[in-house]
Image: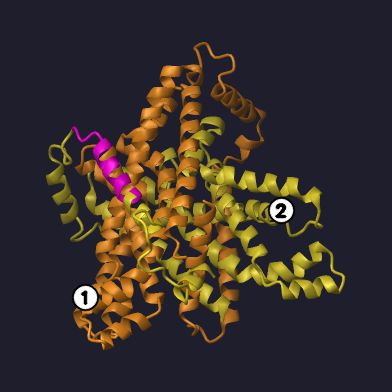
Chain colours: A orange, B yellow
Amino acid sequence: MEQHAETELDNVTTQTDKSGVSPTSHPISFARISAIGFLVLMVFSWGYLLVGSNSGLADFSSSETWDNASRFVQELAGVNSPVRPAFLNRDRWFETGKLAYQTLAMSVLAIGLAGIAVLATFLPGARNVGNGDLGGAYSPAWCLLYYLVRAVFAFTRAVPELVWALLLVFFLSPGIVAGALALALHNYGVLGKLSSEVVENLDPTPAKALKRAGAGNLQMLLYGVVPQALPHFVTYLLYRWEVVIRTTVVVGFVSAGGLGRELRLSLSFFHYTEVFQIIIWYLILVITVDLLAAWLRRLARLE
Amino acid sequence: MVLEAVWTGTPVRMGAPGLLDHRRLLTLLMVGAVILSVVGIDWGSPLFHTGGGGAARNFLAALFPPELSPSFLGLALAASWQTLAFAVAGITLAIVLGLPLGVIASGSVFDAGQSSIAPIAAARFFLAAIRSIHELVWAVLFVAAFGLSSLTAILALALPYAGILGRIYADLFNNVPQEPLQALRASGASPFRVFLYGRLPMALPDAIGYTFYRFECAIRAAAIMSFVGIRGLGYEIQLSLNDLLFGQVWTLMLFLVALVLVVDRWSSTLRRSLIT
């Protein structure tokens, strides 16, 4: 997570770096309009949500709600539980551990599928591959492909994993694979956009030199572009894995797999000590993946 | 910047000796993990369930055209507004929670010394804890504890976002150029004044840019709050799916995509205008 935030930040700042020319002639005024626009949105949003009948203002000011909340926390911890709390049950740890492993496998499958799909399409998704900026010839077909690929990236990215999961369980058997595909679709869009932008931002000199030395278009891309882009791609892939493991549990709600399904079942049966146990497994998964991804990213560094 | 350093000039070690140099080890581990996950999954049932193929064809056919009746477009617009309102409320609360925590976590408002380590560590741990749990997991827990209401959903959305924003703010406050800060210190400014007149204004453009990027993510997060019963685009998508009205599903998805893209464009234009 630590690294993830940095990488994301780098991406945001490099995006801003790439165009030196501002689209607006009065940069300050656009920022001011944005600030006013956001303030207006804020006032209307809070007004709309808090004036409504189900705002929750009354709930949060009544002592009954807070009594309920403290009872819920006690039930999570198994205070005065009539049955033996799940987190004191050894077999239950093994059962949920198996589900945690399935959840981990689902996240790896998801990020693997997304990664393979991105590797196949991120080059056409970069504007400079088709328009000749890398030393090749201008190709209208590649430029058309650029808009197509970018549209697919934008669409798959804008739809959240859970909505993809809802749709997919209509066609696919609910389970780990359907959930992994839903996760892969959204992350395909995210990773595709990031990876294509890496290609658009990288140093074109090696590609141009290869082209002048007589390399073909494919050779130019394979030896001049891909080696530069690959470490960034792997870094992004690993930081998305950290996001995916958090979301995998949630996708399990609908696609009937892993810890997510168990969490939903335990909640609907009011087995709150089991809920607590599942959350412990969830945190173990999140921390493990954060550490693993950070270590793997260190391996991916160039130096 | 890390990426800059990587693009320019960092020498690439060619033909590193040994079977297990870093790159090979990485490739091996990643390919191995994917193979293990493919093998380890229960592939028992066929991928498409009975009638799934037909449903998929119906779904794709429903895009031409999607549901475009004025009354439904009005409903989709109202749902988009609800989703946007939750996203705006969630991100504002996240800023309100994340900014002070980020300032403490950056350690920049304290006098140098041992006494500042405890609050810094506490703030960093708290930020890490709230951002490890997904907003929807927070939502199901909060609904079980407080009951379903708008505030519950806003709080569930705001907590993990405060965690990530706070961490980013802390980094940004620490990564500003040092010379202006030294000038302020030399003229006798307290650490708080150095923060207020040095770190904060210098970090502001990047902080606003990143917050807007998170605002875009918050729209998706607000849409899926439908799983705990919050109205909006996700809620309407679920209703239309239950009635097998795929044309409506497409319309709602296109509204969601449009909403995300508009905010994405707003945020990238704003980032560019803040830099120049």
The mark found on residue A209 in the picture is none
Q: Secondary structure at mark 2?
A: helix
**B33 falls in the magenta region:** yes
B37 sits to left or right of A96: left
Q: Which residue position holds label 1?
A: A218
Identify the main secondary structure in magenta.
helix
Viewport quadrant of the N terminus of chain B: bottom right
Q: Depth check: give the residue in front, B16 or A57.
A: B16
**Alpha-carbon distance for marks 1 and 2?**
51 Å
Give me the chain letter of mark 1. Answer: A
Amino acid tagged 1: Leu
Crowd around label 1: few <14 · some 14–19 · many ≥20 (10 Å): few
Give me the chain letter of mark 2. Answer: B
Viewport quadrant of the C terminus of chain B: bottom right
Q: Which residue position holds label 2?
A: B104
Crowd around label 2: few <14 · some 14–19 · many ≥20 (10 Å): many
Identified at 68% across, 57% down, the residue is: B106
**Range of residues picked out in magenta:** B29-44
Q: How many marks?
A: 2
Q: Secondary structure at mark 1?
A: helix
Amino acid tagged 2: Ile
